[in-house]
Amino acid sequence: MEKKIIRTNNAPAPIGPYNQAVSFGNLLFVSGQIALDPITGNLVQDDIKTETTLVMNNLAAILKEAGMDFSNVLKSTIFLMDMQQFGAVNEVYGSYFTTEPPARETVQVAGLPRGVNVEISVIAGK
């Protein structure tokens, strides 16, 4: 099996020494996405639902570049600055998984890149 780097201009460019995603065999490992607008490069932090929607759209763009969509997601990890926002994040997140949602954990953290409120990563497979 060969490692392949996945890149798309429809999701934010990495802000550090990592790639948007790496495929290996039938698996895709998508780096944590934050609410960076892929066109402007600006953070969008109007409210937690808007922030989460942009995160999910960034994930969707990377999945699409790899020939996948949310139905291929096997596992996700949600990092939250404030667990009190779980309900709103979960509402938006759940709207992207219409059937058979993936395994998941949600953890509250002390800090996230650029001071965002939510970051989500996924592992998908074909």
Image: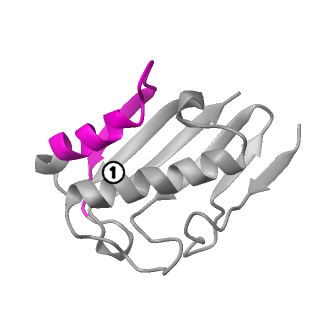
- Along the line of sight, the residue nearer the viewer: 74 or 50: 50
Q: Is residue 97 above or below residue 18?
A: above
**What is the x, y in percent for residue 87?**
16, 40
Residue 81 percent location from the top left of the image: 22, 58
Q: Residue at x 55, y 69 (%)?
A: 12
Q: Is residue 56 left or right of residue 65?
A: left
Mark 1 packing: few (<14 Cα in 10 Å), some, or many (20+)? Answer: many
From the viewer's side, name the closer residue of 13 and 82. Answer: 13
Residue at 49% of width from left, 32% of height from top? 75
Within the image, what quadrant is residue 34 found in? bottom left
Disc 1 marks a residue whose amino acid type is Phe
Name the side, left or right, on which 90 lies relative to 17. left
Q: Is residue 34 magenta?
A: no
Q: Is residue 93 in the magenta section?
A: yes
* Residue assigned mark 1: 79
How far from the left and from the top, in percent, is residue 123? Answer: 57, 38
Kindly state the secondary structure of the residue where label 1 is placed: strand
**Quadrant housing residue 31:** bottom right
Residue at image position (52%, 71%) is: 38
Range covered by the magenta-colored residues = 86-110
